[in-house]
Image (cartoon, rainbow, N blue to C red):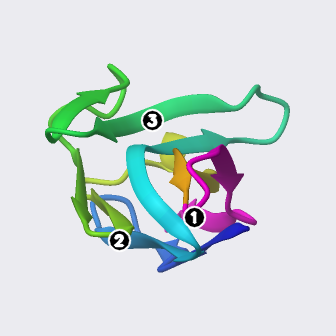
Amino acid sequence: QVQVAESGGGLVQPGGSLRLSCAASGTIFSIAAMDWFRQAPGNQRELVAAVVTGDSTRYADSVKGRFTISRDNNTVYLQMNSLKPDDTAVYYCNLRGLDSDYDPFSSWGQGIQVTVSS
């Protein structure tokens, strides 16, 4: 079983920065894709950023130029700069790959709050 855990959220003023981390643990053979989603109150969960094997990345239009996704082994990061109040949401990571039995997995973190407010 693969578990993931997010860290690094909190309260920040507009224009500030935060770095989210999401670490996977368990019996992992490989991780093919690592995504960050977010969900604000009353809104659907939306994809913020994704990185796949080979380090190809993509971003939601609303965060391009401000957010950067990166990975290091079984950890994925989301560097968030120039934060805006509209970035306030619960952020979730999702990791997909193969476990040690070569079975596919898709694991979600518990979510972490990011609040941008003065």
Q: Mark 3 = which residue? A: 48
* Secondary structure state at the residue bearing disc 2: strand
Q: Residue at x 67, y 53 (%)?
A: 107
The CA span between labels 2 and 3 is 15 Å
Q: Do callouts 1 and 3 mark residues in contact (Cβ within 8 Å)?
A: no
Left/right of residue 25 with respect to residue 16 in the rendered view: right
Q: As rendered, which of 77 and 106 lies closer to the eye?
A: 106
Mark 1 nearby-residue class (10 Å; few <14, some 14–19, many ≥20): many
Q: Is residue 113 visible?
A: yes
Question: Residue 104: percent from the left, percent from the top?
Answer: 62, 41
Image quadrant of residue 44? Answer: top right
Q: Nearer the viewer, mark 2 or mark 3?
A: 3
Q: Is residue 94 visible?
A: no
Q: As rendered, which of 95 and 81 lies closer to the eye?
A: 95
Left/right of residue 26 with respect to residue 65 in the rendered view: right
* Secondary structure state at the residue bearing disc 1: strand
The numbered mark at residue 18 is 2
Q: Which residues are magenta?
A: 100-118
Image quadrant of residue 15? Answer: bottom left
Q: Residue furthest front?
A: 101
User: Does the magenta portion include 112?
Assistant: yes
Q: Nearer the viewer, mark 1 or mark 3?
A: 3
At label 1, the amino acid type is Val
Q: As rendered, which of 35 and 103 lies closer to the eye?
A: 103
Q: Residue at x 30, y 40 (%)?
A: 51
Q: Mark 1 = which residue? A: 114
Q: From what the image shows, is residue 3 above or below residue 106?
A: below
User: Does the magenta portion include 105?
Assistant: yes
